[in-house]
Amino acid sequence: MSQPLLDILLAIDWSDIGLATLETLTMVGGSLVFTVIFGLPLGVLLFLTGPRQPLAHARLYGFLSLLVNLLRSMPFVILLILLIPFTVALVGTSIGVPGAIPPLVVGATPFFARLVENVLREVDRGIIEASQSMGASLSQTIFGAVLPEAFPGLLAAVTVTAITLVSYAAMSGVIGGGGLGDLAIRFGYQRFQTDVMVVTVTTLLVLVQLLQVFGDRLVHRFTHN
């Protein structure tokens, strides 16, 4: 290792990097839980009310689809700013980890719901028809046949959403959301500390790779079992 590179690494406050990484993981983990809690039912409802589905309802599906598309198409930075009053009313602050989680959930839930809808559409219709022919109710068909069959695909959707949340969490640094994004903006950008910027970006890339590898292994395991 060259001396200049060693000097750069020694000059970095690694405790700040570690704390920012922990904050990013907290934001991603916390928001992912609520995204799945809210997004999975929404995705199932989109699937059920879609064309040629058990609860097909053109108006309801059109409304839900429009709402999901509007939220998905809005730039996350703008969404962060628009949701500041809501976030403050909900958690008492718009900054730090607590202030970042509500907009992360609002931004990721429609994205995850659309992924869920697409995954469920890939399930063989014969499974639904066979379940219904045996007298299963709609809820029994969904929870006993469709969701278990789609489980590997849902795991893949969760993985994609988690990676998206890493990107969103980094962007939340624009409004003081904490984590690696906040560190990159305060030190790497505003104070022109290129070394901090490089380390934070590298750490984010490593997090994304780890999430992808872990998610792929889970999908592979449940696909073969």
Image: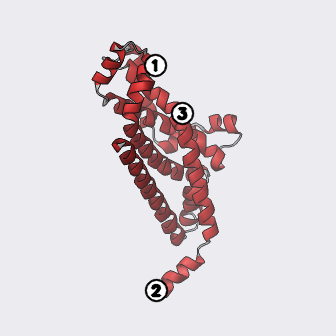
Mark 1 and mark 2 lie on one chain; the one further toward the N terminus is 2
Tell me residue 189's x, y (percent): 53, 63
Q: Is residue 43 above or below residue 138?
A: below
Q: CA distance from mark 3 to mark 2?
A: 49 Å
Q: Earlier in the sequence, mark 3 or mark 2?
A: 2
Relative to 1, residue 42 above or below? above
Q: What is the x, y in percent for residue 153?
A: 37, 38
Could you tell me how far apart the alpha carbons at marks 3 and 1 are, in whole angstroms?
Answer: 17 Å
Badge 2 element = loop
Is 129 on the left-hand or right-hand side of 90? left
- Mark 3 or mark 1: which is in front? 1
Image point (54%, 56%), residue name: 181
Residue hosting label 2: 2
Residue 32 position, x and y percent, is 53, 42
Residue annotated with mark 1: 139
Q: Which residue is mark 3?
A: 37
Compared to residue 131, the image places residue 189 above or below, namely below
Q: Which quadrant, please, contains the C terminus?
A: top left
